[in-house]
Image (cartoon, grey):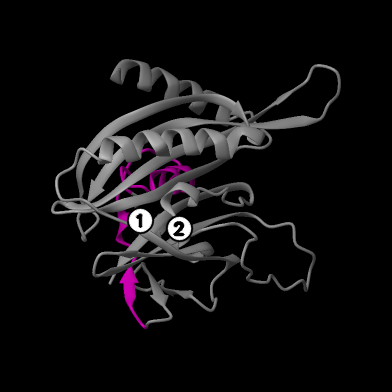
């Protein structure tokens, strides 16, 4: 299985160099908390493109790998189990494919002793900005650190940016140009470009859980156009309907980051 996964990821890396619609998203969908830590379905995705053979129009397609992962509060990966190798599929199937692998994760998580399931509370979109009602980004380019500050005043350093095998691996490896830990100079570049998109809030037992999507890419907004935060017209009140499509910038690269309080 590991060999097949390697071959699949190698194929994605080849396609990445030529795809006009290339983008990455590493997504995290929480299931609950166990005595070991936060249990999530984590999906590492790459977007490429194809044509229909009749026109020059490009059609986006996604592929990737999904896992059932458990993290402690220091973002250390405690346990990881492969769920699916997601062969390339059209973007129109994004939600259905994600729901299918998420359902598989929920079923597997049901075997974890004493798990407490997450309860979705709210979702909003920051539209790739640094400051929104629910969260803000603070960067320290002298010490090369980035922080997310919630409206509760909770401040959390985005430490996953220092580790190329973390959920931020797609972002780090793309902008760092090499598959290794980023240098001090590259860290400054990684931190300066970060923006916030989706913000999700959950209740998990006695904890409040917030998941923020961070990333960057090419922004084609008109000069002077001010991006607006908004609430999507979707249901977000059960685990079953907590799957949604994350908007992506052109050639965007992003990842989800969690905060427990």
Compared across the picture, whether 168 is left or right of 245 comes to: left
Answer above or below: position of 125 versus 100. below
239, 211: nearer the viewer: 239
Answer above or below: position of 115 versus 140. above
Identify the disc placed on residue 190.
2
Q: Quadrant of residue 160?
A: bottom left
Q: Is residue 173 magenta?
A: yes
For disc 2, the neighbor class at 10 Å (few under 14, some 14 to 19, many from 20) is many
Q: Is residue 229 magenta?
A: no
In x, y percent, where is residue 214? 48, 59
151, 164: nearer the viewer: 151
In x, y percent, where is residue 14? 53, 24
Pointer 1 residue: 161
Instruction: Report, in whole angstroms, how far the alpha carbon at label 2 lies from the one at label 1.
Output: 8 Å
176, 135: nearer the viewer: 135
In x, y percent, where is residue 205? 25, 65
Asked whether the viewer can see residue 201, the reply is yes
Answer above or below: position of 136 versus 123. below
Q: Residue drawn at (40%, 17%), measured in percent from left and top? A: 7
In x, y percent, where is residue 89? 59, 26
Q: Residue drawn at (38%, 82%), measured in percent from left and top? A: 152
Q: Residue furthest bottom?
A: 153
Q: Nearer the viewer, mark 2 or mark 1?
A: 1
Specify the quadrant that holds the N terminus: top left
Specify the quadrant that holds the C terminus: bottom left
Determine contact: label 2, label 1, CB under 8 Å.
yes
Compared across the picture, whether 34 is left or right of 134 comes to: left
**Which residues make up the magenta segment?**
153-181
For disc 1, the neighbor class at 10 Å (few under 14, some 14 to 19, many from 20) is many
Please tell me how many numbered marks the rendered image carries.
2
Identify the disc placed on residue 241.
none
């Amino acid at each position: 299985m590991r060999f097949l996964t390697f071959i699949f990821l190698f194929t994605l890396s080849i396609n990445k160099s030529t795809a006009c619609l290339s983008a990455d998203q590493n997504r995290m969908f929480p299931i609950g908390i166990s005595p070991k830590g936060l249990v999530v379905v984590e999906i590492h995705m790459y977007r490429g493109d194809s044509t229909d053979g009749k026109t020059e129009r490009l059609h986006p397609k996604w592929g990737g790998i999904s896992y059932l992962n458990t993290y402690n509060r220091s973002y250390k990966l405690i346990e990881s189990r492969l769920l699916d190798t997601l062969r390339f599929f059209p973007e129109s199937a994004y939600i259905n494919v994600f729901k299918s692998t998420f359902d598989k994760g929920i079923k597997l998580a049901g075997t974890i002793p004493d798990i407490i399931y997450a309860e979705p509370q709210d979702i909003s979109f920051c539209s790739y900005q640094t400051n929104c009602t629910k969260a803000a980004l603070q960067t320290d380019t002298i010490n090369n650190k980035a922080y997310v500050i919630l409206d509760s005043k909770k401040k959390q350093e985005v430490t996953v940016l220092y580790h190329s095998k973390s959920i931020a691996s797609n972002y780090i490896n793309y902008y760092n140009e090499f598959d290794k830990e980023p240098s001090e100079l590259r860290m400054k570049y990684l931190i300066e470009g970060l923006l916030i998109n989706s913000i999700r809030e959950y209740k998990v037992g006695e904890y409040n859980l917030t998941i923020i999507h961070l990333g960057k890419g090419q922004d084609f907004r008109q000069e002077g156009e001010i991006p607006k935060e908004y609430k999507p017209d979707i249901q977000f009140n059960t685990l079953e309907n907590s799957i949604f499509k994350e908007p992506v910038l052109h050639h965007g690269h992003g990842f989800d980051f969690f905060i427990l309080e």
